[in-house]
Image (tube, helix red, strand yellow):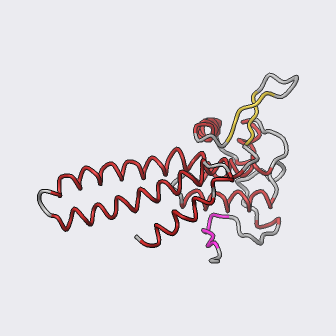
Amino acid sequence: MDKIQYKENSVSPLISSSDVDSQYNTSLINEQELVFSNIIADLVEQWGFKRLLGKVWALLYLRKTALSPIQIQEAFAISAGNVNTVLKELQQWGVAKRVKVPNDRKYYYKVDEHLWRSIANVFKARELRILDDAIEGLDQLETQLKQKNAYQASQVEHVSKTLQIAYQFSNLAVNAPIDKMSKLTSLVKILRNL
C-alpha cells in the first residue's frame, strides 16, 4: 500500500509538540487528533470534498462526546461562518447530526459511529447519481448512433452495460443486507468479463 504523501501545510505523522502548527489551539485538539484530521482531510480532498469537511468530521469522530460549533471553531482557529457551513454540509451528506445535551440550550454535533453507513450515505448521494446520469446519457447516444454508425453504437452500448453492472454492484454494496452480499460475487464475475 502506498504511503500518503503529506503536503507542506499538513501535519507530519511523526510530530513533536514544537512541530505543531500554531494555527491550532493545542489545548483543544491534541497532536494525534491533528494527524488524524489531516489524514482524513487528504482522503476526502481526493474524493473532491473540501479539506475542512474532513478535518471537522475527523475531530467529531474521535471525540466521545458531541462538540459545540464554538469548540470546533476554537480547535481549528476558523471563523464561525466556516464552522456553520461545514456542519450544514456534513449534515446534508448524512455523516453528522445535531444533538441536544441535557440542561444545555446549545446544539452540539456528533458523527455516526458506523463508518460504513457514513460512506454509504455519500456514495448513494453522489457516486450512484453520477453513474446513473452517465448511463442515461450513454443510452441516448447509443440510440442516436444505431442509425449512423453501428460499430460506435456497439462500443457505447458496451460502456453503458459495464456502467450498469457497476451501478448494480455499488448499489448493492451500499444498500444490501449482509445475506444478499453473495450477489456481489456474481456481479464481479460479470464485470471481469466485460
Span colored in magenta: 4-10
Whether residue 149 is situated above or below residue 28 in the rendered picture: below
* Magenta stretch, overall SS: loop
- Horizontal and vertical percent position of residue 148: 11, 59
- Horizontal and vertical percent position of residue 47: 53, 57
Extreme right residue here? 103
Q: Name the quarter where the N terminus is drawn.
A: bottom right
Q: Quadrant of residue 39?
A: bottom right
> How many numbered circles does the render carry?
0
Q: Residue, x 65% and y 36% (percent of image)?
A: 80
Of the pair 117 and 73, the residue shown nearer to us: 117
Q: Residue, x 72% and y 60% (percent of image)?
A: 21
Residue 7 in magenta? Answer: yes
Of the pair 90 and 175, the residue shown nearer to us: 175
Whether residue 11 is situated above or below residue 77 in the rendered picture: below
- Horizontal and vertical percent position of residue 130: 43, 50
Q: Name the quarter where the C terminus is drawn.
A: bottom left
- Horizontal and vertical percent position of residue 46: 54, 61
Left or right of 84, for residue 192: left
Of the pair 128 and 188, the residue shown nearer to us: 188
Q: Quadrant of residue 11?
A: bottom right
Left or right of 5, for residue 14: right
